[in-house]
Amino acid sequence: MTVLEAIQKSAEFLAKRGVDSPRLQSELLLAHVLKTERLKLYLTFERVLVSPEIDQFRELIKRRGNREPLQHLVGSTSFCGLEIEVNNQVLIPRPETELLAEQGWKFLNTVQNGEPRFLDFGTGSGCIAIALCHFAPRARGVALDKSAGALALARTNAARNQVDPRIEFIESDRYSQLPEGTRFDLIISNPPYIPSGEISSLQEEVRKHDPHSALDGGTDGLDFYRYLAGESAPYLKPGGRLMVEFGDGQEKFLPQVFESCEWKIETILNDYSSRPRILIAARTA
């Protein structure tokens, strides 16, 4: 079997299984098996695969056809140009969250005095905290998560990206284990925001392989925003900001959630598909 034949046959199989972008997915998985870049496959279409390569590729294609996420199969994903390891302990970083991280590091770079401090609430894979440290070189922060498995992976990712000395990892259910008196220039979060009743209707890749604790935002999806709005103020320095990602349609409700707790909504930003996605707030009191 040649490289081209392998791609064509696997793309047909994935298409029948309802996998999006089956040709691209096949190419990415074969590039992973051959330890090369996807575009370089086009220069070697006539290369004949050896038996171990075929066996490994077939197994990966079978698992992808069963809707196991591509990122789990190859073991990592790119976030803001940084390699982030992922598994079923953490939410796979989405492109929209890159916008949140970018707003975070831009703000941290405006902080004038000393080392700007951030809190990444619900860090998961650590992708946001790592991006903040990478693109805001003076920044230091806390990556907080209630999952020990997620924190272990976040530590690994921070070390891989050489920012681990600037991040403190704290296992905590919400703010319960955060030291009293700790204050930050930025609190940033991509919290769970899917309404509980909608999780069963999500794509198989999400509902079967992402941890439900990273998805479930309560009955209306707003539980964590109410908590952040009500409990974050003591941890924020004067002039600090709170930045959160939110789900489709939630921009209708979030201003009231935050304004009722004495926050001023500075802006709501759209994502790449022009949907409201990022909220930035400051304290009014």
Image: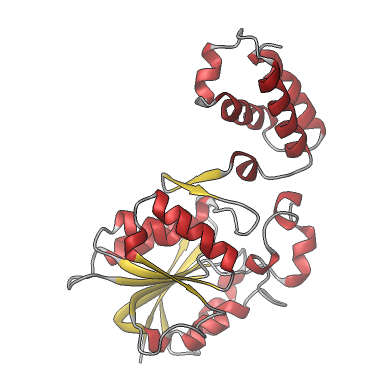
- Front residue of 262/185: it is 185
Taking the spot 62% from the left edge, 67% from the top edge, the residue there is 249
Number of marks in picture: 0
Classify residue 101 by image quadrant. Answer: bottom left
- Vertical order, 206 against 246 (above or below): above
Classify residue 81 by image quadrant. Answer: top left
Q: Quadrant of the C terminus?
A: bottom left
Which residue is outermost to the left? 113
Q: Quadrant of the N terminus?
A: top right
x and y, in percent, of residue 125 in the image: 52, 58
Q: Is residue 5 visible?
A: yes
- Front residue of 55/43: it is 55
Q: Is residue 270 visible?
A: no
On screen, residue 250 versus residue 137, left or right, reads: right
x and y, in percent, of residue 189 in the image: 48, 69
- Vertical order, 69 against 222 (above or below): above
x and y, in percent, of residue 227 in the image: 55, 84
On screen, residue 261 versus residue 108, left or right, reads: right
- Vertical order, 36 against 279 (above or below): above
- Front residue of 38/1: it is 1
Which residue is outermost to the right? 16
Classify residue 174 by image quadrant. Answer: bottom right
x and y, in percent, of residue 198 in the image: 76, 65
Taking the spot 50% from the left edge, 88% from the top edge, the residue there is 230
